[in-house]
Image (spheres, rainbow, N blue to C red):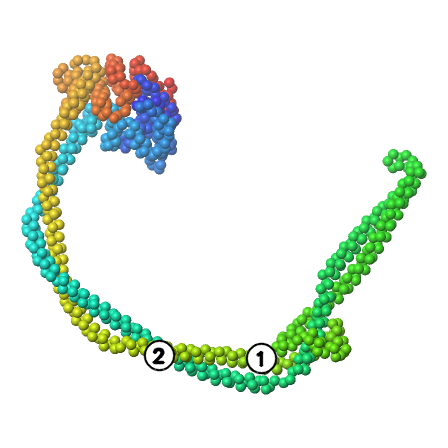
Amino acid sequence: MLIKSVKLHNIRSYLSQDVAIPEGTVLLSGDIGSGKSTILLAIEFALFGINKGLLSGEALLRNGKQSGFVELAFSFDGRDVVIRRSLKRVKDSVRQDEGFISVNGLKQFCTADEIKARVLEMLGYPKELLRKSKGLIYRFTVYTPQEDMKRILFEDPQARLDTLRRVFQIEKYKLVREGTAIVLQALRERRRELAARIEDLPQKQEQLSKISGDLAAIDARAKVLLPLIESSETSVSEKKAQLRALEEKSREISLLKSRFAALIAIFEEKRSLMALREKEVSSLKSEIALLQEGLSDNSSALSQLSFSLSRLKSFSDYLLGDIGAKKQLEGELASAEQLKSEAESELGRNEALKASAQQLLEKISALSSCPTCLQPVESGHKHSVSAEQESRIAGFAVNIASASGRKSSSLQRIISLRTRLVDIQSKEKIVAVLSSELKPYFELASVFNVSLHSQQVQQFGNQSQVLQQAMRPVLSVAEMQAELSILSSARKALDASRERTLLASEKEKVISLAERQVSSWKSELQALDSEKGILLASIERFGDVQAESAALHSELDRLVNDHTALMMQKAALEREIESLSAAAKSLAGEIARKESARKELESSSNLAFWLDEMFTGLVSVIERHVMMKVHQEFNVLFRDWFTMLMGTDSLSARIDEEFTPVVEQDGFDTPIENLSGGEKTSCALAYRLALNVVINNLVSTIRTKDLLILDEPTDGFSSEQLDKLRDVLMQMQLPQVIIVSHEDKIESFVQHVIRVQKEQHVSRVVA
């Protein structure tokens, strides 16, 4: 992993700053408090986000600002990555907001936890190690803040050893031993429990054997009953079948008897109705005879009805003939009015043209000079123009006379047509009145079958000229009123006869219907009488079914009782079998569980022996070998780099079995608290660099082996020790080393310098 750049926006003392970080050794230079370490914290925040106890949002977001972000660009394994993490102030705290991660230009917006998971995957850090040790892997292999550099020297030895076990991933051996002890304790408890559970296994097996013998004996008894029960069931089924057949016969007899009784009831009802209807017909015939006796001679009234109705209908038909010409007259009236309108239009146009020509003629006669050119007008020209206008005036006069004639003729035609239309409208009213008045008389003529004038004329017309004159189609109003009066008189004479005739006709219809019903009922009575005989014969064929049914019921009851007794014996045996089977099943299940517990006890004993006698010892041996290898490598690196940094043989250093630094001066151990500031820094830096190399070699998946960040690693160093730091870094041969320091001499052996300056509480990169 190589860092390319980092961008800070509202982060601590920075407002907005882009910092490009090249490869090689890079020095972040500036006064104390200028903001150098902020860049390193921003890099850590971009990678892992807020880490409770190590890096808080309140410590990063600039005071007074509501939001900020860090954007880090780096590369690894040929991939270019950009990460942005954002901070947002909410109420009394600062929390992470949504950011993004871009790999080779493919950007994806993620939550803070999603970005952290992606970073852990890219850098190859064990997730469980980072979560448990709060970022120790990164802070031990890449970056350690200045205030934490010397802390490891003065920690409690056991705490230091536990921390290193986690970092070196050796803690797992201790966890395995502790877990094995827990498993062994659980196995011992389980073995005691299993031993108690299988203590009565032989007694349970003996009980199961006895129950199995009892079940065999009962099963033999049950088998003896089965043939008897089957025979009993067969006998009961046969008797039930016979009884069902008798019951079916009984139902048929009941149906036949019900049908016979119904036929008798229907027969009597039909005969009674027929007698009533015959009596009703006789009575109706008597009533018709009385009605016919009361009818009088209506020939005179019928003749009057026929004559007057025929004459008025002829008059109505005549009027309707004239009314039919109404549409034609209306069309002729519209044409005449159109001709009149055209004549009036032509008359007005010619009169206007004639008046205009007359005015022009008068103007020309009085004109002496041209109004346009003001030259005198010749008399010949005036005469020529006057003659032309007089000719036009004569033509207009002829047209006016012609149009006036057409207008007068059209007006006379319109008056004549309108008069005829008024006459037709009057006739329409008369026809409407006649149609309404004559309707009841036509109905009366239909009742008495009276023919109209065509037959009457044939009867009387050749005998009298007076009658023919009376049948003329044109009537006066008085004649029409007289004919209507005659019709009214004839109607009064015929109404009473019509009522009697209609009543007699209705009664004749009722008699006809009643006679048809009586005839139909006679046929039905004959059919019913025949069906009664057939039903009676069918009933007699069945014999005495009730006695036979009673005997079968008695026999069936005996068989059912015998079958019930056998079934009760069988049920008792089945209950006993069921009870013993349930007990056997319960015992078998219990024995199976105890057998399983016995096998589990044997397996647990074998497993406990293997874990206690073999596995635990093997884990301890492996742990010792791993720790010895790590300790040896760590000790060599720590000792060499401490000696190199100190530049003297009077002081040497090593680590003991608990990885605690031990400093010797002239062959005697010296407490670290008694060392000078530069000596403490040398010891801490050597320990820090050795830890870096050992972890990178031990954890093969880490992808941050090319990067080292040192925050003020030279506190208390002399000029010679600064030179030794250069030698150490050259020996490590790392592709990218970032050093934060205010020592000017370091600039002489680094490849790049980034200067940071702070003014008015705002930090910025100046070079």
Is residue 238 left or right of 470 when viewed as pictured? left
Q: Quadrant of the N terminus?
A: top left
Residue 630 found in image quarter = top left
Is residue 569 left or right of 522 when viewed as pictured? left
Q: Position of residue 582 (x, y in %)?
A: 13, 55
Is residue 637 left or right of 97 when viewed as pictured? left
Label disc, if present, on residue 533 of the rendered structure = 2
Q: Position of residue 454 (x, y in %)?
A: 69, 74
Q: Indicate whether 558 appears above or below 268.
A: above
Q: Which residue is mark 1?
A: 502
Label disc, if present, on residue 237 of the rendered structure = none
Q: Amino acid at mark 1?
A: Leu
Mark closest to the chain's N terminus, 1 or 2 = 1
Residue at (19% x, 71% y) in the render: 556
Q: Amino acid at mark 2?
A: Gly
Instruction: Work out whether residue 250 can be spotted.
Output: yes
